[in-house]
Image (cartoon, helix red, strand yellow):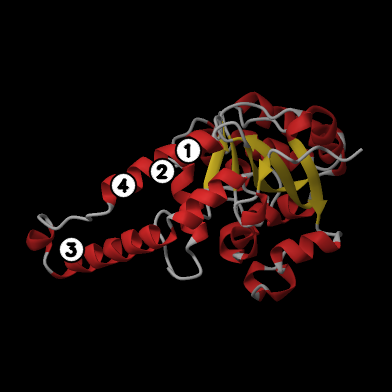
Amino acid sequence: MSKDLSLTLEIDSPHTWPSPVRQILSENRQLFLDFHRRQIELQKLREEDFLDSLSAKNMFFDTIEEITILLENILMPYNIAAYHCTRLARYEIDCIIEDGLKALTSDFINHRLVTALGKGLLPPDSYKYLLSDDVFRKAIQNEFGRRTGSVWFCSSKNTLKDSGSVYRLFRSWGGEVVYFNHEENESIGPCLRSIGTPCIVRCSLPISQAQIFFPAYSQSFISRYISDEIKYPHPPYELDMHMQRDLTAEEIIEIVEISSPEFKRLTNYNTWPESHEIR
């Protein structure tokens, strides 16, 4: 049975956005364009003469801020479509469909390793190698940047088509914490590339809970709306997002495997450079 996606917004597809959002954007389009063009001017001024730039202002800022707050309040009850790029074994695909997507924790990582070992996908030598590896231990303990406690996503199909951003996630099993520093290792790299298949887990995330690096989602919706005239609007509408909890099965829309024509449509992986090849 298909899931109700009426409250799930695709940032790439303005026709999925609420009518009040589209109306406000349409009524204020020129203002958004003027604001972003002024931002570009200010950036150039900062590069050319930093001291002079300190007194320069964007005269549209206050009005934009008011509209941003209004849009954010409208968006809050909605969900946003998000894409989790990964490599999964068949039993892991079934588990996500049944139970949802788990946040990264040391216990969950160990569970994945033990399960893969028990199913004969992870050789005993490779299992022992990972457990004894100092880099792996430090990665689990967030010594190379915090990755545990969250699930990470991208919001735009543009990111899925950017091979440099995603190919490593598709190529090696276990996630970044497992394959970090091991991809070129002859002892473990080929093993991690042999487990599972590239997958895109398409999810529906509550905007009120999915965290982003920028202050407001509405800023990125504005950027998407004017992207036909402003080449690099800021902030970008291609968001990196994370959830600091497990996702329920109801929040999983679908899992797209590389064998599906949809995977090719979403990623254009058949056009990627040879160095980014996935299979």
**Could you tell me if residue 218 is visible in this image?**
yes
Secondary structure beneath dot 4 equals helix
Q: Which mark is residue 46?
A: 3
Residue with the mark numbered 4: 63
Tag nearer the camera, 3 or 1: 1
User: How far apart are the alpha carbons under marks 4 and 1?
Assistant: 14 Å
Distance CA(mark 3)–CA(mark 1): 29 Å
Please say if 162 is above or below 112: below
Sequence-wise, the earlier of marks 4 and 3 is 3
Quadrant of image for the N terminus: top right
Percent of width and height locating residue 163: 61, 65
Q: Amino acid at mark 3?
A: Arg
Determine which residue is flagged by label 1: 72
On screen, residue 124 above or below 51: above
Q: Secondary structure at mark 2?
A: helix
Specify whether 49 is left or right of 224: left
Q: Position of residue 145 (x, y in %)?
A: 44, 39
The crowding category of the residue bearing disc 4, from other C-alpha atoms within 10 Å (few below 14, some 14 to 19, many at least 20), is few
Mark closest to the chain's N terminus, 3 or 1 = 3
Label 2 or label 4, whichever lies nearer to me, is 4
Between disc 4 and disc 3, the foreground one is 4
115, above or below 27, in the image: above
